[in-house]
Image (cartoon, grey):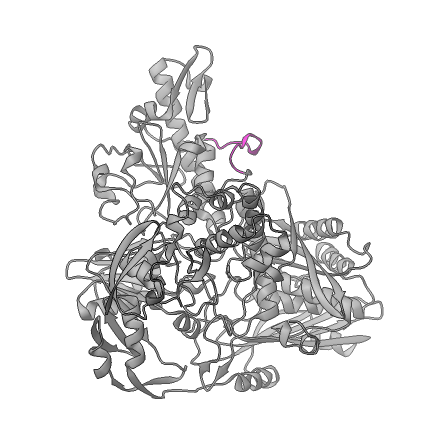
Amino acid sequence: MAIYNLQVNGKEYWVDVAPDTPLLWVLRDHLRLVGTKYSCGISECGACTVLVDDNAVKSCVFIVSRVKSLKVTTIEGLSENGDHPLQQAWDELDVPQCGYCQAGQIMTAAAFLKRNPKPSLQQIDDAMQENLCRCATYHRIREAVKLASTKM
Amino acid sequence: MSTLHNSSRRGFIKITSVTGGGLLLGFSWFSAEAETPVIMTQANFAGELGFNSYLSIGTNGTITIFSPNPELGQNIMTSFPMIVAEELDADWNKVKVVQAPLNSEKFERQLTGGSGAIPHSYKRLRVAGASARHLLVAAAAARWNVDAAECTTSNGFVIHANTGNASGYGELAEDASKLTVPANVPLKNRKDFKIIGTAVRNVENKKIITGKGIFGLDFYREGMLFAMIQRPPAFGTKIKSVDAAAAKTMPGIIDVITFKNNVAIVGNSTWEIMKARNAVQIEYEKDGNTESTSDHNQILLSLLDSGKTTQRRKDGDAETAFANAAKIIKSEYQCPFFPHNPMEPMNFFADVREDAVELIGPTQTPGSARAAVAKLLNIPEKKITVEITRLGGGFGRRLKFDYVLEAAELSSIIKKPVKVTWSREDDMTGGSYRPAVRYRFAAALDGKGNMIGYKLRGVGINVGNSTREDCFPSGAVENLLIDSAEHTSPITTGPWRAPVSNFLAFAEQSFLDEVALAAGKDPVQFRLELLQKARTQPVGAIKYNIDRMETVIKRVAEKSGWGTKSGVSQGFSVYFSHATYVAQVCEVVLNAGRPVVTKIYAVVDCGEVVNKSGALHQVMGGIVDGYGHAMFGKLTFKDGAPEQNNFDQFRLIRIKEIPEVEVHFIDNGIDPTGLGEPALPPTGAAVANAIFKATGSRLRNQPFMDEPLYKSSKGF
């Protein structure tokens, strides 16, 4: 066990966990930030995507000892009032079905739009290919990323 | 999830009056701020509070509608309240929706499955809304001393135009609650609908997109323990010995418990139990057949030739028809096992105490789960409460309650509240699969290309009846024989989105394409001729509506420009399942010789479309799901053990692989049917028939990517 000081959503947290604990489980079990989802545990589905600094990271394989002073942003901290252009677009286009993967989808898109604020549909698909949606809401995910990009 | 806070107990007033529909209505008021994101307990919801309804109205005008059925993405939590609000003439912006816990006394059919919730509840929900509206009008009329018949309602207000009186529902709720619900209230004419038929966004969007804890896996209670369970890695094996000494000493581990064929690692956090699990040494031994996919392939073939069959439908004399046929077409189709793979793995919370048992989590069948836990623990059902969290997908997997039983049994052993979480690997290897099935078809044509005989034999592994014997083309063929046989295996199976239909539709609609082409007929025209036959010379029972099926066929041909396009190859399919008619046309182009699915048109007759946004979403999702699984899905076995255990090995469709999808609904005003399943079944055949048109290669086995056509082409 070791003590880590983490910067998550602009707040400081101290946790005492094993160094190999994935950030996902620190967020979920120790900080009770459950918006970040577990689904595959092997970096294949993207449900656990968070921002580490401005990069989309699969938190299920990103261990806590690597976080150091990097700034972690989860879905809970993406915007103050849940009104990030992506969140607005997700609601406006009614993207979720079951909803389980959507936080990860939004976080992947958030990192992507920071790098590429005016993407083509093809570029959106390339970026969102990382994230699985078992309900297959892909058409609306694509449209919502596009819509958000027009408002950022 | 939304809930009722304890402080909201005060001020509840109830009426309970049984309406003609047998529905209980109640009014109460509580302030909107009483809502908190804590999962509610049965105790603060049920009758003792004087609250046992679908609907309540706050003095501030807030309408709260309880949604009894588990929500797994089918959007029932939005469409049910829409129906109530429509008849109530509520202001949708003031409607709050709350997931109700299991309460068999208050709600009927509190389950999610079979695309059955909307057809079951449509009338009941309308009556609930209309009855409440009637009482509010009566209360207003009495207050104003006017004739109720002169009052109208709109957007949460009762209005009396002649006197200029108007009151919000909140102001009238107390008076209304003292009145008696009439036996028969009139329902709206659909031309007056203001909410039904519009696009209404998912009522839980905000929570979903801001990461609120609403799923079972998100549930946490102070003092609860975490557990994972190691189950036998192969079907047909059992535990021989367990050595948990090392695991028990690891950080955060409370205990390692062996029960039945399970070894439960119990601890303080998920990662700690995941690690300790790897340190448990378990030996297994054979306890039945340990089958491999190669065995299944042999078994399916031998079942077709010499299995003990059960006759499902017989019309006329198929043998004679085949003996006299000018042409006979024979074909076989096979599909593999599938896991359901909901994004949220199985999990459940259980707290088994002397006085009461609490179960909390994602289940499609809370009632059956409760009954099974009562039996397991040998306690009366009334001691058990079940709270339903949002489900991160279901696809039929959560119709089984094995994971609920595990959690309850473990809690009863350790005498602590515990949440059992399945890893993705547990979820994919833990059974309850869509069964592997093989179909043998034969069609007899006369000299004019008329189908005078039809035979179907369905065989499968733990599948039950793998046919849907009364489906089209039954009723349109004079001589028909349908039978089935099955093999019993230790591999567990269960319903998977559109059970049986999810593959039978592909096989049947691909075969009918083969027959049409062999008869020298256009595939669409061939179906229409068969339907005309069923209409004018019906054979045996006909359990589909000929007009409705004909309409979706004609409409999809029109919308897709069937037979008029150059540069694309089209494939057609139509299927009736879950009381809904869906016809599809798929378009394929060749890219360097490789078929690429570019577009799928769908025409859907589900009767009244309740929520345009939700309905469209279900159809598009179902089509992409059907396409993805037909193309990529397979679960294979080696010596009883599944060979794929995570998404790196089981390929699910991703965003770059989806075709364009264009959906049209038939506007006929018939009472609505469900949409969670019926769009999926026809897709595989529409795709395969288009690919045949484009390439001349007939795909008869799923997944398509393992067929020679794709094996030999690059880039997939």
As for residue B194 lying within the magenta part, the answer is yes
Q: Nearer the viewer, residue A121 or B306?
A: A121
Q: Position of residue B26 (x, y in %)?
A: 31, 36
Q: Position of residue B597 (x, y in %)?
A: 69, 62
Seen as rendered, the residue at the extreme right is: B447
Q: Give the magenta-colored segment's residue range.
A: B186-196
Q: Residue at x 53, y 71 (%)?
A: B465
Query: How many labels were placed on the picture?
Result: 0
Q: Is residue B87 left or right of residue B302?
A: left
Q: Is residue A59 left or right of residue A30?
A: right
Q: Nearer the viewer, residue B187 or B698?
A: B698
Q: Is residue B351 left or right of residue B661?
A: left
Q: Nearer the viewer, residue B420 or B27?
A: B420
Tell me which corner region of the image, top left, top right, bottom left or bottom right, holds residue B192: top right
Q: Is residue B282 above or below residue B508?
A: below
Q: Nearer the viewer, residue A46 or A74?
A: A74
Q: Is residue B531 visible?
A: yes
As for residue A57 lying within the magenta part, the answer is no
